[in-house]
Image (cartoon, rainbow, N blue to C red):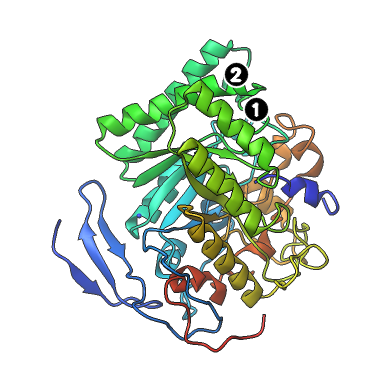
């Protein structure tokens, strides 16, 4: 996710089936997964449902439309004392709540080595491979597929920075390419061996301007080729269909996106999905998003997914660390910073995406809530468990950004849980997409 710190500078998923009575959104069915445990699934509604929010039905939307959620920070938050609840106010695994709410895909970022020489975490969830395995198993337990988002860096990677992993420093392009291949293959095998239902692998994160310390499309394309080859080989070995995605941002610049897609085509990169970040408060309109996606599909024959999107439900700051989106003068006209406004925005993005033939969306970090109230001393918790956007330990690796502006959660007002861990009514927008709600059109 790019721009978060820029904005912050102003403030720093064949045995017997059984019905299981589960609270929240109806009964779930269970089936035995050979590698792990019972898989619990939750059916989507077969008609409109009553709700606190109003959602219009999306015409011709498939049950397979990706209703995704990035939940990378969950483990660090839970270690920090955060508790998640279901709609009845009872403590419950957040991944169960997500599945009950219609989410069918979980996205998890992976950093190579997000720790300093003394083992102190850089923050942002401390998202190493073991963390992805733990979170991926929990998501898979509730019937959701998992998208693995390799940053190929030890910390945040976006258009403003693509730091090379510490272990790869000083490597030639060829050596780095081999290291990336090995890391991808080894990591993915660990996840599949653990029973994580990986359905998509993202090779790189918002790589418009480089990746793993390399700059320019030719150098990056060689690295992408190594990552893609690793995924293809693992998928073949495990006889599992895994989609390969490449991820870019600046969707508002259709010329830049077309240039990148053209270069990938000329290079002959083996990939399936062109993934795009689309934040409506930064990245233009739904109409432009559709235009860019249709061009990629029609001109280059690639599928498209919205890898990141979000919107705020409040203008309040939950932890005193400042928010990327204030929710005041920086919101989109017609979509106020309310629970209904958040639901309407996501519903409309999904409708536009579906109309354009896009595979679906991933909501970015909808589970990232405060570890404590703004009046509390949260800094020691962020530092110890990595539950803020960055810790002071990241300063040496990322001196120009984390080294200056480390701290807490810049996304709490864009989460789909309130500051105390209760799911917002807007989270069920994913459940309501096909048939909408029977509720009369409410106030935004």
- 368 or 425: which is nearer to us? 425
Q: Position of residue 268 (x, y in %)?
A: 47, 23
Residues packed near mark 2 inside 10 Å, few (<14), some (14 to 19) or many (20 plus): some
Q: Position of residue 190 (x, y in %)?
A: 36, 35
**Number of disc labels:** 2
For the C terminus, which image quadrant?
bottom right
Q: Position of residue 137 (x, y in %)?
A: 37, 50
Q: Which residue is depicted at the point 74% across and 40% down?
A: 392
Q: Which residue is depicted at the point 51% across and 55% down?
A: 356
| Residue topped by disc 1 | 210
Q: Is residue 413 above or below residue 87?
A: above
Marks 2 & 1, CB-CB < 8 Å contact: yes
Residue extending farthest to the right is 10
Left or right? Give the position of 400 relative to 55. Answer: right
Alpha carbon distance from label 2 to label 1: 8 Å
Mark 2 or mark 1, which has the lower sequence index?
Answer: 1
Q: Is residue 180 above or below residue 35?
A: above
Residues packed near mark 1 inside 10 Å, few (<14), some (14 to 19) or many (20 plus): many
Q: Which residue is depicted at the point 52% across and 12% down?
A: 175
Could you tell me if residue 70 is visible in this image?
no
Q: Position of residue 40 (x, y in %)?
A: 29, 63
- 3 or 208: which is nearer to us? 208
Badge 2 marks a residue whose secondary structure is: helix
Could you tell me if residue 380 is visible in this image?
yes
Q: Which mark is residue 68?
A: none
Q: Is residue 340 above or below residue 292?
A: below
| Residue topped by disc 2 | 219
Q: Which residue is depicted at the point 39% across and 76% down?
A: 25
């Amino acid at each position: 996710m790019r721009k978060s710190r820029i904005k912050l500078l102003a403030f720093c998923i064949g045995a017997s089936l059984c019905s299981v009575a589960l609270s929240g959104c109806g009964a779930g069915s269970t089936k035995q997964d050979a590698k792990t445990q019972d898989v619990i699934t939750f059916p989507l509604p077969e008609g409109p449902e009553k709700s606190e929010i109003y959602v219009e039905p999306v015409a011709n939307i498939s049950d397979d439309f990706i209703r995704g959620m990035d939940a990378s920070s969950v483990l660090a938050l839970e270690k920090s004392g955060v508790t998640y609840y279901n709609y009845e106010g009872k403590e419950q695994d957040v991944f169960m709540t997500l599945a009950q709410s219609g989410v069918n895909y979980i996205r998890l970022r992976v950093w190579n080595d997000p720790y300093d020489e003394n083992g102190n975490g850089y923050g942002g969830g401390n998202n190493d491979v073991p963390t992805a395995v733990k979170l991926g198993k929990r998501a898979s337990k509730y019937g959701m597929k998992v998208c693995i988002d390799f940053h190929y860096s030890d910390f945040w990677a976006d258009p403003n920075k693509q730091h090379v992993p510490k272990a790869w420093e000083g490597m030639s392009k060829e050596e780095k390419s081999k290291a990336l291949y090995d890391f991808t293959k080894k990591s993915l095998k660990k996840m599949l061996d653990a029973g994580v239902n990986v359905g998509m692998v993202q090779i790189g994160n918002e790589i418009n301007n480089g990746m793993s310390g390399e700059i320019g499309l030719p150098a990056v394309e060689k690295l992408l080729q190594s990552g893609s080859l690793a995924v293809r080989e693992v998928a073949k070995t495990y006889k599992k269909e895994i989609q390969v995605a490449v991820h870019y941002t600046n969707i508002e610049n259709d010329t830049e996106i077309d240039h990148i897609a053209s270069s990938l085509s000329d290079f002959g990169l083996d990939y399936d999905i062109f993934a795009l970040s689309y934040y409506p408060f930064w990245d233009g309109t739904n109409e432009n998003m559709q235009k860019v996606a249709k061009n990629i599909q029609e001109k280059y024959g690639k599928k498209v997914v919205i890898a990141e999107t979000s919107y705020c439900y409040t203008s309040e700051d939950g932890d005193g660390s400042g928010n990327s989106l204030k929710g005041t003068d920086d919101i989109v006209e017609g979509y106020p910073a309310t629970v209904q406004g958040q639901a309407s925005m996501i519903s409309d993005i999904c409708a536009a995406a579906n109309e354009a033939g896009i595979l679906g969306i991933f909501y970015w970090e909808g589970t990232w809530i405060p570890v404590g109230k703004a009046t509390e001393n949260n800094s020691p918790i962020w530092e110890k468990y990595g539950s803020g956007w960055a810790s002071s330990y990241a300063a040496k690796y990322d001196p120009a950004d984390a080294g200056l502006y480390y701290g807490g959660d810049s996304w709490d007002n864009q989460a789909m849980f309130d500051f105390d861990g209760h799911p917002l009514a807007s989270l069920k927008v994913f459940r309501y997409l096909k048939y909408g709600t029977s509720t009369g059109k409410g106030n935004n």
